[in-house]
Amino acid sequence: MSDRGPNTLAVHAGEAPDPATGASAPNLVMSTTFALEEPAGFSINAFEGELPYIYTRWGNPTVRMLEEKLAALEGAEDCVTFGSGMAATSAVLFSGLKAGDHLVMSDVNYAGTAELARVTLRDYGIETTVADTTDLSAVEAAIRPETRMLWIETPANPILRLTDIAAVGGIASDQDIPLVVDSTFATPVATKPLELGADLVVHSLTKYIGGHGDALGGAVLGNRERIEPLRTDAIVHFGGVLSPFNAWLIARGAATLPIRMRAHEEGAGAVARFLENHPGVRRVNYPGLASHPQRELAKRQMANCSGTLSFQVRGDGAALARRMAKELSIIHYAVSLGHHRSLIYWIDTAALMESTFHLEGEQLARYREFAGDGVFRLSVGLEDAEDLCEDLDRVLS
Ligand SMILES: *Cc1c(COP(=O)(O)O)cnc(C)c1O
């Protein structure tokens, strides 16, 4: 199957007609336990090689189907899924780091990841240095002898800043430090971080891959040697396993990922150009716009510019956000992104700094250069772009 095109892989990888019934669509196996033909051990540590299905926290056929589909889409040897993107993130951080280790992380990324690294990891004796990963010298300067992981997110939530994966991957491999890329915004349709030098890729499946706003999930992908310990330790012992029902929903969403990403990109491009020409809008950040400061990198690293953009307005953003929550008729004023429904949310710079990023000096100045006093993050769904523009125009005017 792996020599097939991405559209074919999205539909068929991991799936096959059921050998007993011939059912064409995948089965949903909700069973938590499996009847064994022979007694087996009681600890995951007692097993070697391919694990039979014993208990759903250890492995489940519907979950495995999704993992195989995602591995095929990402071009990865293996995949392990989790109950949410944050469960995937915490599994990678807590499995890969121990007290005394040091982490280098991008200074702008998903708020939950930023807070976990800056607060929780520190409490466990793991120190984090945040760096503007668009600046390679800042990445190099942040590395210490005890650095054991480099973590980047590209495009970065919420300001759509890009990091050059191949360049950071070069630094990581020179120093023998594993590079983890949160590729949630890009999806494997846009970017394949493993081909560019990443060791692990993390996705929130809740976003584009599931794509319909009805199932939380997370995934980590890489070679077998790196995924196996996550499966036996992070999944079996931390327990943040994906529900088979969610795996089934997410696999159904993933089947249309390539076609949805084309539509997201087309819609986001149209809305981004509309906003860029709107008198009420100061600035739009979207990797597909000629005005994106890293447009050249976007062209090199992203085969699809995805569907999320952020923009600043000229007036009072917080007041506009209140108006949007009440008056938008199609776009939902709601967190999250990557769904077939368009979603918008106001992210105030001062509040985000205080709650999450805590940036100062040059790093704060660089964030503000992108985001001003705050941005609206808009996830463009699969509706008609004219309807979305009309909805936005009414509240912006
Ligand atoms: C949403 C998100 C996460 C967290 O995923 P959940 O499924 O909400 O736990 C992590 N990284 C990025 C970039 C995200 O957008």
Image (cartoon, grey):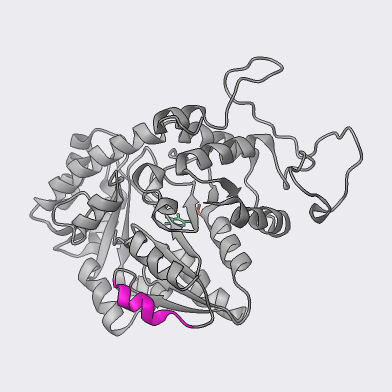
Q: Residue at x 54, y 81 (%)?
A: 146
* Residue 359 image point, x, y percent: 35, 79
* Residue 100 image point, x, y percent: 60, 82
Q: Residue at x 21, y 37 (%)?
A: 385
* Position of residue 359 in the picture relative to residue 210 (left or right): left
The reply to whether residue 383 is visible in this rendering is: yes
* Residue 292 image point, x, y percent: 18, 57
In the displayed orientation, state which residue is furthest to the top: 22
On whether residue 346 falls in the magenta region, the answer is no
Q: In this view of the protein, which residue sits in the foreground, 65 or 336?
A: 65
Q: In this view of the protein, which residue sits in the foreground, 15 or 281?
A: 15
* Residue 103 image point, x, y percent: 50, 75
- The quadrant holding residue 54 is top right
* Main SS category, magenta section: helix
Above or below, 24 against 148 in this view is above
Above or below, 331 against 173 in this view is above
* Position of residue 77 in the picture relative to residue 139 (left or right): right
Q: In this view of the protein, which residue sits in the foreground, 39 or 62?
A: 39
* Position of residue 85 in the picture relative to residue 367 (left or right): right
Which contiguous range is marked in magenta?
Answer: 135-144
Q: Residue at x 48, y 46 (%)?
A: 206
